Image (cartoon, rainbow, N blue to C red):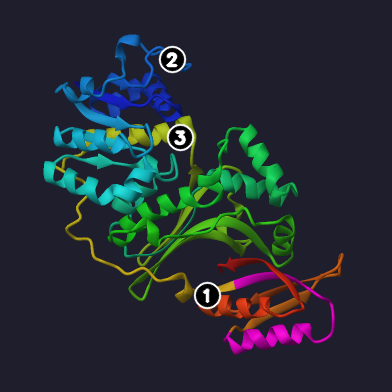
């Protein structure tokens, strides 16, 4: 059995997961891959820090040159995160003809084109299954198992933090702040949760999935993102009354040759498979023109699930009979991304207004003047100084809805448009 030496960049949660999996399942992994995988070096900032895992001190280094100068190391496994100096380390590894495995969603989403070009030119491989949805094999699914399909649509719950928060708001009646605090106490949310709750994390992951599914370069700036901080308990309750569940969805669609790329809170029917994905779990719903609809489900984060995906990528590198890169930009096409104003959707709109005759009629008129058709119009009981009105539209252009709401907000009887949530049937 051939021995292969690898280097680990980082020994945080994911790095510890990789170490523990290789120690615990090393025998099975060797049988399946035909290789005895040895971790030769681990790059850390502080070699004296206690990380709660028993790693021989001689494996630790704080100098990347110890790794790059060692020709016996064939695979560099990056689980550090961030852009700088991670980008430099990956490019130096590739130029030294070392294969790379990474879990870095931000790096692949923002600098994937440059990295893939270097990988292709140097005849090595890069695998990044762990960059999206933790232990769920969605990238391999798109690249390999669904290669016979033209992917038409992807909808995913790909951020466990926001899904946990929305689950608590839905099932336990918590408000956003209380649910976020519990998520932080359980380790699902960072002390600064901005990347999760404002949609950045999901946008990075969607950019990667869309690039692979639609074989095109995706500029992260073209992915529309909207977080969950404006979702209130009453929106959750009104959704329930109408038979919907609120989820933060990442959506990619090919509509007549143009892509829709968007991350935002979405109401989906309570009978949809994604509606029943709760807590910190992830799921990706894919529609292909041959396979039809399918869903991949599992833990989207965590030490062992993400570590599992990383080790799976290491095995894929070793098993591969192909020479050179598993990513090629040569067949990618330049697909345009639709502006959000050109996207069509149904809309839930909640507003507060002065309860007096004629106001609802004026609202309906403004909507009609902007070609926004209404499916339902419900006035809730008056509480305090203002009445609450909830309306649901038919499918309309986003630009028309925004223009109508801007004009409605200028009416003296309107207090505020409190929330707008898109609906996906």
SS category of the residue bearing label 1 = helix
Left or right, 208 with respect to 187, comes to left
SS category of the residue bearing label 2 = loop
Q: Position of residue 365 (x, y in %)?
A: 68, 88
Local crowd at mark 1 within 10 Å, few (<14), some, or many (≥20)? Answer: many
Q: Position of residue 15 (x, y in %)?
A: 39, 27
Q: Earlier in the sequence, mark 2 or mark 3?
A: 2
Residue 353 visible (yes or no): yes
Q: Position of residue 415 (x, y in %)?
A: 75, 71
Given this view, does label 2 or label 3 mark the residue nearer the observer? Answer: 2
Per the image, the residue denoted by label 1 is 398
Per the image, the residue denoted by label 3 is 305
Local crowd at mark 2 within 10 Å, few (<14), some, or many (≥20)? Answer: few
Specify start and end residues of the magenta stretch as a single range: 347-371
Whole-Å distance between the Cαs marked 2 and 3? 24 Å
Q: Earlier in the sequence, mark 3 or mark 1?
A: 3
Judge whether residue 277 is colored magenta: no
Left or right, 230 with respect to 274, comes to right
Q: Residue at x 71, y 67 (%)?
A: 242
* Front-most of residues 159 and 304: 159
SS category of the residue bearing label 3 = helix
Q: Quadrant of the C terminus?
A: bottom right
Per the image, the residue denoted by label 2 is 49
């Amino acid at each position: 059995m051939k021995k292969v030496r690898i280097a680990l960049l980082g020994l945080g949660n994911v790095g510890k997961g990789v170490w523990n999996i290789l120690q615990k399942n090393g025998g099975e992994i060797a049988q399946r891959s035909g290789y005895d995988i040895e971790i030769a070096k681990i790059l850390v900032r502080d070699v004296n820090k206690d990380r709660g895992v028993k790693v021989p001190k001689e494996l630790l280094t704080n100098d990347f040159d110890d790794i790059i100068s060692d020709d016996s190391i064939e695979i560099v496994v990056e689980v550090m995160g961030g852009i700088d100096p991670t980008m430099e380390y990956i490019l130096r590894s590739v130029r030294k003809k070392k294969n790379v495995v990474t879990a870095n969603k931000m790096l692949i989403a923002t600098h994937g084109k440059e990295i893939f070009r270097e990988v292709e030119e140097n005849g090595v491989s890069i695998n990044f299954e762990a960059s999206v949805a933790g232990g769920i094999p969605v990238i391999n699914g798109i690249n390999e198992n669904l290669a016979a399909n033209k992917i038409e649509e992807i909808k995913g719950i790909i951020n466990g933090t926001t899904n946990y928060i929305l689950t608590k708001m839905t099932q336990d009646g918590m408000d956003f702040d209380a649910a976020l605090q519990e998520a932080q106490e359980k380790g699902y949310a960072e002390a600064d949760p901005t990347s999760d709750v404002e949609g950045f994390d999901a946008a990075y992951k969607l950019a990667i999935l869309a690039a692979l599914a639609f074989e095109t370069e995706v500029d992260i700036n073209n992915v529309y993102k909207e977080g969950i901080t404006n979702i209130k308990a009453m929106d959750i309750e009104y959704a329930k009354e109408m038979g919907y569940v609120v989820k933060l969805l990442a959506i990619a669609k090919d509509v007549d040759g143009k892509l829709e790329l968007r991350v935002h809170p979405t109401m989906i029917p309570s009978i949809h498979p994604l509606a029943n994905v709760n807590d910190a779990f992830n799921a990706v719903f894919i529609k292909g023109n041959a396979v039809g609809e399918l869903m991949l489900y599992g833990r989207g984060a965590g030490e062992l699930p993400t570590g599992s995906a990383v080790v799976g990528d290491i095995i894929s590198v070793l098993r591969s009979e192909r020479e050179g890169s598993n990513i090629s930009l040569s067949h990618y096409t330049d697909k345009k991304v639709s502006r959000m104003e050109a996207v069509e959707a149904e809309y839930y709109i909640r507003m507060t207004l002065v309860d007096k005759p004629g106001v609802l009629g004026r609202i309906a008129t403004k909507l009609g003047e902007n070609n926004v058709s209404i499916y339902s119009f419900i006035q809730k009981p008056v509480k305090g100084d203002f009445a609450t009105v909830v309306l649901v539209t038919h499918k309309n252009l986003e630009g028309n809805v925004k223009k109508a709401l801007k004009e409605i907000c200028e009416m003296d009887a309107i207090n505020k448009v409190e929330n707008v949530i898109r609906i996906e049937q």
